[in-house]
Image: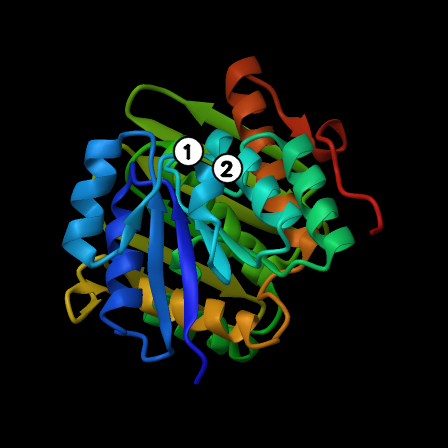
Amino acid sequence: MTMIRVGIIGCDSTHTENYAAILNRDIAGNGMRATRLWGVDAKQARAKATATGIDIVTDSIEAAMEDVDAVMVLNRWGDDHFAPSMQAIKKGLPLFVDKPMCDDPTEAVTLVRAAHAAHVPLMSGSAVRYDPSMMTLLADLPRIGRPRSVVFTLPQTWRLYGVHAIEIMHAVFGSGAIDVTAIRDPQTDIVTARWPNGQIGIANQIRDAWTGMLCVVVGDSGWTNAEIRISDTVNGVPHMYVNLIKRFRRMLNGEPPPTTPGELVEVVRVSAAANRSAAESRQVPMSEIPALQDL
């Protein structure tokens, strides 16, 4: 198996050390290695590189993309993803962009268009999709008939974790949300997204609640659920991250990315609609949010 060298951009979240550990300890067993790391905080980058066995800490994003075969953009915040992702695409490097891919739907459209035009494989999204319990839920959907409701309860802030709920709604319903309503206060976010034909997704975000996540899907003829725990680990790292890296490698081996360009953009659009709804205290039609036209 050919060794894949990976350059990592960003070290301001725990995802950096988790993904680097999976790669450099070969926990996923798929012949990948993190060889270069860049972060805004050079001291933090050096510490994480030492802890995970990354060979080179660079002084620029561009240098982190030299002599590598793929890139992972792992900055914590979505508004820090666009510029380095575009650099990777211009270099022709396949890439994974951490969640959320972007905060701005216009940037999301530009990014997926650039990747498509350059024939660069692009994977992005929430690791929750790859949690074993969530994978079981998604495989169980045919049993419950047409999905009608997704209710996802999660901790933390909407900016940091809201994408987890939105992505699972899209994994269940597909693209095509018609409007979004969000209510926000200092302790909670309640976000409701409607799809055609009576399908509805609800995210209940409680800032200081239990740190796990719970998803319940109700269909025409049954229901299914998943409990997502970060404590579900493989050799000390969350199981969902190991599964994500395995899927990333499959894309690098030539499989299509797990989500379409359209769905990548739709997740960003629904998140943006939720933020607009909360700020303006109104229901936001998805027609207001910039969309991806046909590639």
Q: Which mark is residue 81?
A: 2
How is colour applied across the structure in the image? rainbow
The image position of residue 223, as x and y in percent, is: 45, 68
As drawn, the label of residue 77 is 1
**Above or below: residue 211 compared with residue 159:** below
Disc number for residue 244? none
Quarter of the image with the N terminus is bottom left
Q: Say which quarter of the image contains residue 131.
A: bottom left
Q: Nearer the viewer, mark 1 or mark 2?
A: 2
Around disc 1, counting alpha carbons within 10 Å, would you say few (fewer than 14), some (14 to 19), or many (20 or more)? some
Do the residues bearing badges 1 and 2 touch, measured as CB atoms within 8 Å? yes
Amino acid type at circle 1 is Trp
The CA distance from mark 1 to mark 2 is: 7 Å
Identify the element where label 1 is drawn.
loop
Question: Residue 108: image x %, image y %?
Answer: 64, 39
**Residue 157, above or below 174:** above
Q: Is residue 243 left or right of residue 209?
A: right
* In-front residue for pair 127/204: 127
At horizontal 50% and vertical 59% (from top left) the residue drawn is: 70
Mark 2 secondary-structure assignment: loop
Q: Which residue type does callout 2 highlight?
A: His
Direction from residue 272 to residue 215 in the image, left or right = left
Residue at 22%, 49% in the rendered image: 49
Residue in view at x 41 percent, y 53 percent: 7
Q: Is residue 179 visible?
A: yes
Residue 208 can be seen, yes or no: no
Residue furthest to the right: 294
Which percent across, then down, holds residue 81?
Answer: 50, 37
